[in-house]
Amino acid sequence: MTFTTTLLKWFQEHGRELPWRQTHDPYAIWLSEIILQQTRIEQGRPYWERFMRRWPTVEALAAASEDEVLREWQGLGYYSRARNLHHAAQQIVEMGGFPQSLEGIKGLKGVGDYTAAAIGSFAFGLPAAVVDGNVFRVLARHYGISTPINTGEGKREFTALAQELLPPAQAALFNQAMMDFGATQCTPASPACGVCPLQQSCVAFREQRVAELPVKRRTLKVKERHLVYIYLRWQGQTALRRRPAGDIWQGLYEPLLADEGSQAGEPLLAGAAEPPVLVPVRLGVKHVLTHRIIMADFYLWEPAERPSLPDGYFWIPESRRGDYAVSRLVELLFAQLP
């Protein structure tokens, strides 16, 4: 049997049953693809279900505020995805409906080649091959391809191969099969080569190169950043600000911050009516992002008199803190508060 025939037969027996595969609604499919970017299915599925319950149509999502969307997204990380999702929903409403061509879908904010191919094939049956980490891995191993997957040359080579293997009349099935095969059979570590239906034709298995493929060229060094947060508590109130554009966690909220780029805490502390007593809540917290490592310290300050706040900060009742979307780091730090 050919690669494609074998793969589709495997998928009939081992394909995953997922709720967004039970519909051709482009909104539901698009929402799942955005949520599952850089997110495991078991983590992303509850978010997809909550979004679909709260905003069952693209019109409902477009009418929501960005704060509401960010709050519902909290915990998933990569918050630009949520902002792009909200913006794209408004684009779709302005267009009068979901675009049905690959170019039209790629015109949506936050949608690239992979996501457009997934939406196009799953919702509209367009003969476009998806190429993600799972597809790179399956093809690199099976065909013994050493071209780095994170280069322009690699992306072109793997995309062309996937497109060549795709049966136009079964685009959705083929794409889903490739994704599932990579996610559950040809996994990054400890793939199930012993029971793989493609074992006999797999170059990597035959040449004992499974652990070496796919090849990825080294990229940027990870940078480290140190943040110091001060949680201000005064008579059941606390202070937050919304993080500005151009930095991590844009649009999310945070307590009083003092770090190398924003010394907001210093003038506040210097102008306090009494010498501030900062109680350590959690020190040396390590939080890993894609291209940086955050080291955070977290202090509690409970002044006797209400201090003036720096520009950008505002008071809220502590009981309303859950109404504001925060980063995963701040969420973890809040959980440590006495």
Image (tube, helix red, strand yellow):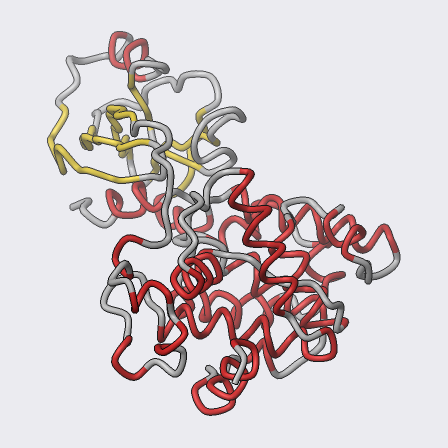
Q: Nearer the viewer, residue 263 or 16?
A: 16
Relative placement, left or right, of 300 versus 329 is left
Relative placement, left or right, of 231 versus 183 is left
Relative placement, left or right, of 88 versus 68 is right
137 versus 90 height, above or below: below
Residue 127 point in image, percent of width and height: 73, 68
Relative placement, left or right, of 54 versus 316 is right
Residue in the image at 18% along x and 30% along y: 297
Residue in the image at 43% along x and 37% along y: 253
**In the orientation shown, which residue stands out farthest toward the bottom?**
13
Q: Nearer the viewer, residue 269 or 251?
A: 251
Q: Nearer the viewer, residue 303 or 218?
A: 218
Residue 117 point in image, percent of width and height: 67, 60
Residue in the image at 32% along x and 24% along y: 257
Residue 11 point in image, percent of width and height: 49, 84
100 versus 274 height, above or below: below
Quadrant assignment, res 249: top left
